[in-house]
Image (tube, rainbow, N blue to C red):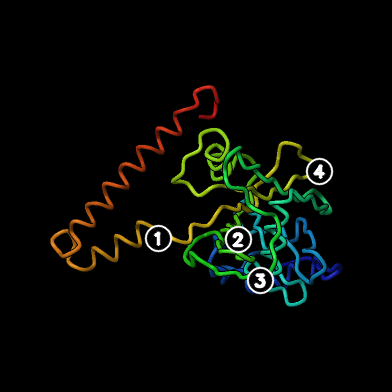
């Protein structure tokens, strides 16, 4: 691996991240050291030693990729699930904060609660707790708890400009065609480069967290492992499958309910 000479704090930070990057579960080229790792932009996370970093990674013969890496700047370790970082991220999104990097802006994009719906407070008393979930995913998701508030945050590790489907569809369900089976999108964090007004990229999303819900896949796998349809849970399995069918139909009906919106 080659990196720039350690002539700036960003160069030194890039080198520290590059040392563990091939082992990261969300890194596309797992186990392969990159030829060049540089910090494209970064923003400090409050008055801490944490930062949100956009990292450019170049490997031989491949197009450069950009990653989103919340990091502890002294040790260079990943800090996505550090409470102070999660708390900053949630507040930036819900409060619509704007933070200047060297080459662009990191901007929180909150979605206002529709009339009659349940709003979410931007701040709450009590310490922040973080529970990571989805350990096999290519992104990083975690549940953030503060006081009586529970939100789920997903950090998009690959930073790509343009439309982010999770943002576009989530905003559609939150504003234009409310569908109660979808976890409500509360907002997202995006990066806006100074040199490309149309090059905004979503970095993370914040949704309501359904504490009483379980993934249908996990529930069905557990039930099928005990005799399948012929076992004692056969009727329950059929009921879940039917409910999934109804929910899928309702989702498509909601998606098709606004022909006045060209994207849908």
Single out the mark in the foreground, 2 or 1: 2
Check residue 194 in the rendering and tell me which mark sits there, or answer none. 4
Residue most extreme to the bottom: 75
Which quarter of the figure has residue 66? bottom right
Single out the mark in the foreground, 1 or 4: 1
Check residue 214 in the rendering and tell me which mark sits there, or answer none. 1
What is the distance, in whole Å, between disc 2 and disc 1 at their CAs? 19 Å
Which of the two labelled residues, at mark 1 and mark 3, occupies the earlier sequence position? 3
The residue under label 3 is: 82
**Helix, strand or loop at disc 4?**
loop
Single out the mark in the foreground, 2 or 3: 2
What is the distance, in whole Å, between disc 1 and disc 4 at their CAs? 42 Å
Which of the two labelled residues, at mark 2 and mark 4, occupies the earlier sequence position? 2
Q: Residue at x 30, y 43 (%)?
A: 245
What is the distance, in whole Å, between disc 2 and disc 3 at their CAs? 18 Å
**Helix, strand or loop at disc 1?**
loop
Which of the two labelled residues, at mark 3 and mark 4, occupies the earlier sequence position? 3
Which of the two labelled residues, at mark 1 and mark 4, occupies the earlier sequence position? 4
Residue 257 visible at all: yes
The reply to whether the C-beta atoms of the residues labelled 3 and 4 are less than 8 Å apart is no
Single out the mark in the foreground, 3 or 4: 3
Q: Residue at x 54, y 45 (%)?
A: 166
Query: Dot 1 surroundings within 10 Å: few (below 14), some, or many (20 or more)?
Result: few
């Amino acid at each position: 691996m080659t990196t720039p000479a350690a002539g700036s704090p960003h160069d030194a930070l890039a080198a520290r991240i590059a040392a563990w990057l091939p082992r990261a579960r969300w890194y596309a080229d797992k186990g392969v050291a990159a030829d060049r790792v540089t910090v494209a932009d970064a923003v400090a996370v409050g008055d801490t030693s944490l930062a949100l970093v956009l990292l450019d990674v170049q490997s031989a013969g491949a197009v450069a990729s950009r990653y989103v890496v919340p990091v502890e700047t002294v040790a260079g370790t990943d800090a996505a699930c550090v409470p102070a970082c999660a708390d900053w991220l949630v507040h930036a999104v819900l409060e619509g904060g704007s933070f200047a990097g060297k080459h662009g802006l990191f901007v929180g994009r909150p979605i206002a609660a529709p009339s009659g719906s349940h709003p979410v407070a931007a701040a709450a008393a009590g310490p922040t707790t973080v529970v990571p979930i989805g350990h096999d995913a290519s992104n990083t998701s975690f549940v953030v708890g503060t006081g009586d508030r529970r939100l789920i945050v997903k950090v998009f590790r690959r930073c790509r400009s343009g439309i982010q489907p999770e943002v576009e569809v989530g905003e559609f369900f939150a504003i234009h065609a409310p569908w109660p089976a979808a976890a409500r999108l509360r907002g997202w964090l995006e990066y806006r480069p100074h040199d490309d007004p149309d090059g905004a990229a979503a970095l993370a999303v914040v949704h309501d967290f359904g504490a009483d819900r379980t993934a249908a896949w996990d529930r069905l796998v557990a039930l099928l492992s005990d005799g399948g349809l012929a076992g004692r849970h056969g009727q329950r399995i059929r009921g879940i499958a039917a409910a999934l069918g109804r929910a899928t139909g309702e989702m498509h009906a909601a998606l098709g309910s606004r022909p006045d919106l060209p994207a849908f």
